[in-house]
């Protein structure tokens, strides 16, 4: 941040994590700057369709410091006036199974005002919201909110939240100057990040298209083709077979394991419905296998287990019954988008009896080997490109947080800068 000017005079804030602050600033606990409100408690029986209820914001509705409407829940319940969102409210995730998600937040704007929020969320309501919205996205807030209590779930209580210390200019005008500067700078950074994320999206689309072409048409595009009789396949090489999944493999769920048995380290990896969950001291499989997610929003996703590992009851293990290349079969299953066959319920899940009836192309084993090797080589190139872009995104995000932190703790003086400077 050396390119930005500093304030002329500083004083000791008295808080080690904050350090020195400008002489005319003050440290204040959040409870003196606004009100923290815990959200609405509701039961599953009160969930209704959009036309019959009020929108309830949950943790999933806060993504990248913005309100996301992809996963919405509506309830039919009387809501207290103070629990209706207002412009300038800061919506905070205060309880979550993941430690990294506690404290994520977003500003309520014109579109998101007039609804409510769930009991695992907190609203911080303050007239200083233009400045505090950035404090809540600073490293200083993350450091202090990391003091939350942990029992069976990670939680940022209102008691902890209210006692977090925020360095703040006494002047509302200065607060607004800092907020205006950060509005411009973060918007620019967010645009750069979004463009890079779009590039990753395009590369992932290319990845799937490459795999789809290889597993459905083969590597030699000059061979005669035939109608497979399967809608998602279309034409396939004339010499290929078309078989039900049940004719080439047996699908079995893994074994139950409780979360307390899974550690961050251990002898054998544990795979669940969404991939690696942690480690355990026992294993229930030994070999190379395809793993299909069985439950949850991402059911149908494909992972691989190698050597000795534990597959939980939320993972379906594919046991081939014919000689075949398991990587070829895994990539074939991947492009079939098995998630579309989930049984809709409160917890989406795959019906194995339906999956095994689906038909797949079946090349010779030698062709399977060639296809698997081709996919591995080509996707490795794409993955390298994706990793490079992801690294660039991470650096931009780190810079974004550092810039916000420097501005809201007074380490840089942006008062004399226009929002476009720097």
Image (tube, rainbow, N blue to C red):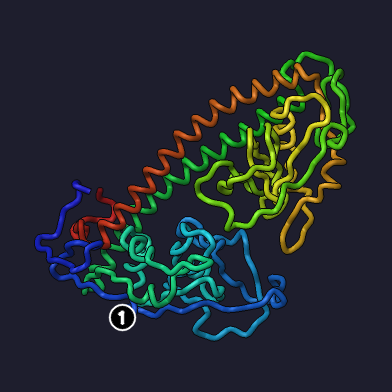
Element at label 1: helix
Residue named by callout 1: 32
What x and y, as percent, mark residue 8?
Answer: 10, 60
Q: Using the image as rendered, state which of residue 176 and residue 321 is in the foreground.
A: 321
Give the residue displayed 56% in from the left and 46% down from the top: 279
**Would residue 258 be found to the left or right of residue 333 on screen?**
left
The answer to whether one can see residue 234 in this image is no
Q: Nearer the viewer, residue 411 or 413?
A: 411
Q: Which residue appears at 47% of the width and 55% of the height?
A: 64
Count of numbered marks? 1
Q: Which residue is rendered at x = 86% and y = 37% of the image?
A: 246
Please provide percent x and percent y for residue 418: 24, 56
Q: Residue furthest top?
A: 222
x and y percent of residue 313 in the render?
71, 51
Q: Residue 118, relative to residue 352: is it above or below? A: below
Q: Nearer the viewer, residue 111 or 94?
A: 94
Q: Quadrant of residue 239?
A: top right
Q: Is residue 211 left or right of residue 60?
A: right
* Vertical arrangement, residue 173 with respect to residue 209, above or below: below
């Amino acid at each position: 941040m050396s390119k930005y000017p500093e304030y002329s005079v500083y004083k000791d804030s008295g808080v080690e994590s904050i350090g020195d602050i400008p002489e005319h600033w003050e440290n204040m606990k959040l409870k003196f700057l606004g009100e923290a409100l815990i959200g609405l408690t509701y039961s599953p029986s009160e969930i209704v369709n959009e036309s019959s209820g009020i929108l309830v914001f949950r943790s999933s509705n806060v993504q990248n410091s913005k309100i996301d409407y992809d996963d919405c829940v509506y309830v039919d319940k009387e809501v207290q006036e103070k629990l209706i969102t207002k412009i300038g409210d800061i919506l905070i995730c205060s309880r979550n199974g993941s430690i990294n998600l506690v404290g994520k937040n977003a500003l309520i704007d014109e579109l998101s005002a007039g609804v409510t929020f769930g009991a695992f969320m907190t609203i911080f309501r303050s007239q200083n919201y233009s400045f505090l919205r950035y404090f809540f996205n600073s490293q200083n807030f993350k450091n202090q909110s990391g003091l939350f209590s942990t029992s069976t779930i990670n939680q940022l209580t209102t008691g902890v939240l209210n006692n977090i210390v925020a360095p703040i200019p006494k002047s509302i005008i200065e607060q607004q100057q800092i907020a205006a500067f950060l509005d411009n700078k973060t918007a620019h950074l967010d645009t750069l990040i979004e463009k890079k994320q779009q590039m990753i999206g395009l590369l992932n689309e290319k990845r799937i298209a490459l795999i789809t072409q290889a597993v459905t048409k083969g590597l030699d595009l000059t061979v005669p083709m035939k109608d497979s009789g399967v809608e998602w396949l279309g034409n396939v090489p004339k010499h290929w077979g078309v078989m039900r999944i049940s004719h080439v493999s047996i699908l079995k769920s893994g074994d139950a394991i409780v979360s307390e048995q899974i550690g961050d380290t251990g002898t054998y990896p544990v795979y669940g419905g969404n991939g690696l969950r942690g480690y355990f001291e026992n294993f229930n499989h030994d070999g190379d296998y395809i793993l299909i997610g069985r439950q949850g929003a991402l059911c149908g996703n494909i992972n691989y287990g190698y050597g000795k590992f534990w597959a939980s009851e939320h993972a379906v293990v594919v046991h081939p019954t014919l000689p075949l290349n398991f990587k070829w079969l895994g990539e074939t299953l991947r492009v079939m988008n098995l998630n579309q066959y989930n049984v809709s319920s409160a917890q989406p899940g795959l019906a194995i009896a339906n999956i095994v009836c689906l038909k797949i192309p079946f090349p010779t084993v030698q062709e399977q080997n060639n296809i698997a090797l081709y996919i591995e080589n080509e996707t490795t190139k794409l993955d390298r490109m994706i990793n490079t872009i992801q690294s660039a995104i991470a650096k931009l995000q780190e810079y974004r947080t550092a810039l916000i932190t420097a501005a809201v703790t007074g380490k840089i003086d942006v008062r004399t800068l226009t929002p476009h400077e720097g």
